[in-house]
Amino acid sequence: MAKKVEKTHNPKAVATRLKSMSQGFKTVFQPTDTVDVEGTLTPAGQAAGELDADLGRYTNTDTAHETYEGAKEDRDTNQPAVLARLDAFEIGLRAKLGTTSQKLVDFGLKPKAKGKRSAASKAKAAAKAKATRQQHDGKQAPPAAPEA
């Protein structure tokens, strides 16, 4: 009994087999010659056409992969410039709208939260403001009028 040869499923090997077989059907047979394919008489021209269509599935994916790799390389090469431009736009938007503006959300940016001041910090700020006013005015603030 003859030994069965194991055929590879590697896409490149399959594409090579398809190309060779298609070429054989085109050169060895006349387009009207028929070959028994799984019990069906198939003209050589039709067989070559079917093999070429199958080969297209393999070559199209190779071309698409090359295009993808080129686009990915272009993206990766230009990423530093894109990120710099993106950062510049973000800085410009924050300068134009303010760092706490809710409009920043429309641009996909998170506004800074307004700080909540405690009672102690408010009292400290009021005392500092009063001291500054006294220093600028050069006089004491008038005493509070007694309530009657």
Image (cartoon, rainbow, N blue to C red):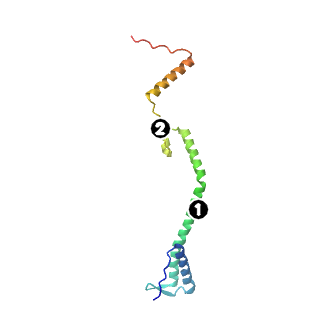
Q: Position of residue 39 (x, y in %)?
A: 43, 86
Q: Position of residue 45 (x, y in %)?
A: 52, 82
Q: In the drawing, what numbered circle is on residue 70?
A: 1
Q: Residue at x 55, y 44 (%)?
A: 90
Q: Mark 1: few, some, or many residues within 10 Å (few <14, many ≥20)?
A: few
Q: Position of residue 3 (x, y in %)?
A: 47, 85
The residue positioned farthest toward the left in the image shown: 148
For the N terminus, the quadrant is bottom left
Residue under numbered circle 2: 113
Give the CA distance from mark 2 to mark 1. Answer: 42 Å
Q: Position of residue 47 (x, y in %)?
A: 50, 81
For the C terminus, the quadrant is top left
Q: Earlier in the sequence, mark 2 or mark 1?
A: 1
Q: Nearer the viewer, residue 110 or 9?
A: 9
Q: Mark 2: few, some, or many residues within 10 Å (few <14, many ≥20)?
A: few
As displayed, is residue 97 above or below residue 51?
above
Secondary structure at badge 2 equals: loop
As displayed, is residue 135 above or below residue 44?
above
Identity, as a three-letter code, of the amino acid under mark 2: Ala
Q: Quadrant of residue 59?
A: bottom right
Identity, as a three-letter code, of the amino acid under mark 1: Gly
The residue positioned farthest toward the top in the image shown: 148
As displayed, is residue 87 above or below residue 71?
above
Secondary structure at badge 1 equals: helix
Q: Nearer the viewer, residue 95 or 130?
A: 130
As displayed, is residue 120 above or below residue 98?
above
